Image (cartoon, helix red, strand yellow):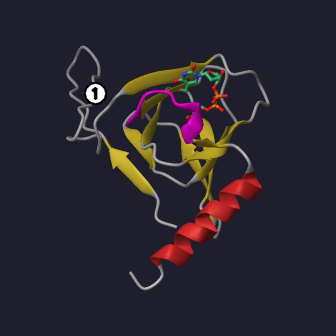
Amino acid sequence: MEIITLDFNIKGDDRGSLIALEQNKNIPFNIKRVYYLFDTKSGVRRGFHAHHDLEQVLIVVRGSCKIHLDDLYQTREILLDNPQKGLYIGPLMWHEMYDFSDDCVLLVLASYYYLEEDYIRNYDQFSEIVSQHKKRNVGK
Ligand code: T46
């Protein structure tokens, strides 16, 4: 599984740090939506879905959390604990977020508006779609 992480430059000076995020520059798509998760209760695990088409970059701007990634063939656990790092999650990647620190603020930049039809929330359905997709792309 290819894990795409993004490193953001800090525009730092003696006043502190600043990171700028720009579509099609350090974020690899047009940004249509921004949302953030905070005050996540202890022990909570969320996500449990993949997207058909959506592209996203996840950035923990404060605190830490872990991301479970599953492309049907491999799984990976990624620790996000640095506002300088982004994790790219593209289509057909099952993901779950867990181990949120009390102070965690998880910022997400998304390539499209909120669309429930883009979610695959059932793992069996995810498995079916990825397998079909792989079959169609064999030999390409
Ligand atoms: C994802 C992970 C990383 C909206 O109304 N608009 C929005 O833009 C979003 C993201 C959510 N919602 C509503 C839908 C639900 O009623 O907010 C509620 C919580 O959403 P959800 O249960 O989908 O949250 P997570 O944490 O499971 O997943 C979210 C994103 O939905 C998802 O796209 O990739 O964060």
Where, by quadrant of the figure, is residue 109 drawn? top left
Rendering coords of residue 138 (x, y %):
48, 82
Image point 29% across, 39% down: which residue? 8
Above or below, comparing residue 39 to residue 10 in the picture? above
Along the line of sight, which residue is nearer the eye, 38 or 128? 128
Residue drawn at x 76%, y 30% is 44
Residue 100 in percent (x, y) is at 66, 31
Q: Which residues are magenta?
A: 110-118
Q: Is residue 107 above or below residue 39?
A: below
Residue 15, compared with residue 101, is above or below; it is above
Please identify the residue farthest to the right as the structure is shown. 43
Query: Which residue bears the numbered disc 1?
Result: 19
Would residue 33 appear left or right of 115 to someone viewing this image?
left
The crowd level at tag 1 (other Cα within 10 Å; few <14, some 14-19, many 20+) is: few
* Residue 72 position by quadrant: bottom right
- Residue shown at the point (29%, 42%) measured from the top left: 29
In the depicted view, which residue is nearer to us: 75 or 18?
75
* Residue depicted at 23% across the width and 32% down the height: 22
Question: Is label 1 in a helix, a strand or a loop?
Answer: loop
Residue 33 included in the magenta stretch of the image:
no
Give the answer, above or below, for where 40 lies relative to 29. Answer: above
Ligand 1 occupies quarter? top right
Pick whichever, 133 or 73, lies toward us.
133
**Residue 116 placement (x, y as % from top left):** 59, 32
Q: Which three-letter amino acid code belongs to the residue tagged 1?
A: Ile
- Which residue, as the protein is rendered here, is positioned at the far bottom? 139
Relative placement, left or right, of 24 versus 81 is left
Examine the structure image and report whether residue 115 is included in the region drawn in magenta. yes
